[in-house]
Amino acid sequence: MSKSRSTSARRAGVVLAILAALVLAALGCDKGQQQQQTVARKKPARYVVPAEFDRELNRFEVDSLRSMKETHGITRDEYWDGYGGVLASDAIEVWYPVGKVNVLQGVAMFKLAAEARQKVTDVFGRAPAGHAVIICSPNLEWYQYNTGRDWWIYSAIKGDTISVQAPIDLHTRGLLKIVGPREYYEWAIGRLSDGHAPRWVEEGCASYLAGEAVILEDQRQDFAALGAVAISPSETERVLAAEKERRETRRAYYNAYRMIEELVKKRGETSMAEWVNDMATEPDLDAATRKAFNEDYVALCKEASSWAATEASP
């Protein structure tokens, strides 16, 4: 572990200021969109550290941590009693909550983000510019209070800051290995497209790259009462921009994924990647679409929606 771990009041104050700034940057906005908050803030969430999380690491945990730090190029490892810690490289920075053992949650999230960054580089031919800052919440109450998001939305993304639910909670729900990289992918699509990708493209590409199909299929039962599974691309975009109601939003997530999946099946992953890259350089979405697919955006949306022709009702 780093020798820089201490209880210095001065350093702790600096870290508290940093954490506060990062959290405030994530308040009230998700994925770069100015949206209404879905959780009312009544009072600050208080995090009580479980005793088993506030002990020294044993030698097996220390060995695992050391190995992962070397493998993923972690060059910064600091911890402050009462405030939490940080693990960072040149491209990724992960903040984890107070409790010495929580460094293992931090390094797990770092590992997933680092692997996602490599996959983005392989698929799109380049890594996103910018330094991704990932804030790991200590528990659901803290996440809801500090992001305004509800339990069914796994992260709040604003700029280069990704606030995620507690990794330990995501793990116990069987979601961590998908949600961890998925949120990084969504951030990366926004960076690679220079913010010009439609919301359904950000969501759909992130779900596709993360292999989220199994989760989305399970969630179909949740929006079954809404009737038809398929909705139009414009309705998908509208719902995703708002993310207000759980069932409607989950149906929109599902539609976004199926649209990207359909495009990859028909046009290939390379064309999908070129499209996202072209969004950053072409004058508008139509121009980027014509360059990558040789048709306009409206025609491409119609093509992407063709998955619904053989879709069974939930």
Image (cartoon, rainbow, N blue to C red):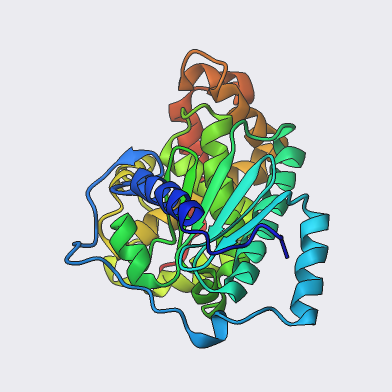
* Residue at the spot 63% in from the left edge and 34% down from the top edge: 128
Where residue 142 appears, as percent x and y from the top left, is: 35, 67
**147 or 221, which lies in front?**
147
Screen quadrant of the C terminus:
bottom left
Q: On the rendered structure, is 305 left or right of 113?
A: left
Q: In this orientation, which residue lies closer to the viewer: 188 or 291?
A: 188
36 versus 123 height, above or below: below
User: In the rendered view, does 254 fall on the left or right side of 132?
Assistant: left
- 89 sits left or right of 242 in the view: right
- In the image, residue 23 lies at what x, y percent? 38, 51
Do we see residue 53 in this rendering?
yes
Which residue is at 51% across, 86% downward? 51
Above/below status of 68 relative to 34: below
Q: Is residue 223 visible?
A: no
Judge by depth and name the residue closer to the eye, 265 or 83.
83
Quadrant containing the N terminus in the rendered view: bottom right
Q: Which residue extends farthest bottom?
A: 51
Q: Along the line of sight, which residue is nearer the eye, 205 or 140?
A: 140
In the image, is residue 288 above or below residue 141? above
Quadrant hosting residue 245: bottom left
- Residue displayed at 63% across by 46% down: 92
Task: Indicate the position of residue 192 as horizontal and vertical percent values.
Answer: 59, 31
What residue sits 64% from the left and 51% below the top? 209
What is the total number of numbered labels drawn onto the structure image? 0
Please state the horizontal and vertical placement of residue 264, each as a whole percent of the image: 65, 43
